[in-house]
Image (cartoon, rainbow, N blue to C red):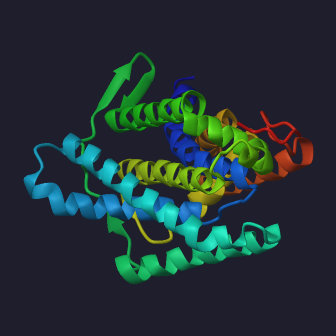
Amino acid sequence: MEQFVQQIINGLSLGAIYALIALGYTMVYGILRLINFAHGDVYMVGAFVGFYVVRWMAPASPSGFGLLIISIAAAMVACGILGFIIERAAYRPLRRAPRLNALITAIGVSLLLENLGQLVFGADPKDFPALVERTTFTLGIITISNIQVIVLLTAVLLTIALQFIVHRTRMGTAMRAVSFSHDAAGLMGININRVISFTFVLGSMLAAAAGILVGLYNPKIDPLMGIMPGLKAFVAAVLGGIGNIPGAILGGVIMGIAETMTVGYLSSTYRDAITFVILVAVLLFRPTGLLGTPQRTKF
């Protein structure tokens, strides 16, 4: 029982990171019906921005926790700009092209970012600085580290902020209108281009935060680190119902718990295979995902 509860805690921490990445997939799909395969590589860029910010600021920083906040903020800003550039340069010119063109472009952008990452950052893995000294707390049969607490709290706060933006702001209302119908939203005076750019920026910022959290959780980063987490986050979005924000969060949590349970009770060899088992099961038995519906309205 103790091991089972511990695996749940570990799975929640990992699932929180997947959920942050999956939110970017689901928001872009909700707006454009596009699977942005470059999103996992934006997450990689976020981790490296944090890495270099920490190295640059470490001598002058008052504390590791202050550095953590600064690195998250810097990575979110940098990846927000990157998301804007990707949408403006790669996807906007193909807005009215067949969807296959945009899908192939997304794969091309992903490969471009991976190769640029190897060129700029170097192909060798790097140790992400230990910003916070790891300590553990024991509460009955539960053992949780301060790193896991930081990951969970950060993910919860960012998710609450996202829900506030989507449901309580004018831009969020515009996002929901555009996800329903581009034409109808345009007739209502909504600037479609601005909404789509904002969606890419917002999703990229969440992916950047996930990159920093992974640096804390598993301090090895490399230019190809976005491939498998990106795929897992995509499966999480599909599992929850792609285009559905609560679905992406639920899918991420399920993916994290499934992975840690697989490692804990079967073998770490199957930790990636379980992702695709879940994907096949979802496509066979519930193609719209757990919270998805066949309707076009997604937010």
Residue 226 seen in the figure: no
Residue visible at 81% across and 71% down? 100
Q: Residue 14 location, x and y as percent?
A: 52, 43
Residue appearing at x 51%, y 75% in the figure: 114
User: Is 55 on the left-hand or right-hand side of 96?
Assistant: left
Q: Residue furthest bottom?
A: 119
Q: Nearer the viewer, residue 169 or 109?
A: 169
Residue 167 visible in the snapshot: yes
Q: Position of residue 263 (x, y in %)?
A: 59, 47
Give the left or right position of residue 44, taking residue 96 as reference.
left
Residue 198 image position (x, y, % from top left): 54, 51
Q: Is residue 134 above or below residue 214?
A: above
The residue drawn where x is 22% and y is 40% is 65
Question: For the N terminus, which image quadrant?
Answer: top right
Residue 203: x %, y % from top left? 54, 50
Image side of residue 22 versus residue 128, left or right: right
For residue 8, side relative to residue 282 (left or right): left
Q: Nearer the viewer, residue 113 or 273?
A: 113
Residue furthest to the top in view is: 140
Which quarter of the rendered picture does the C terminus lie within? top right
- In the picture, residue 101 is in which quadrant? bottom right
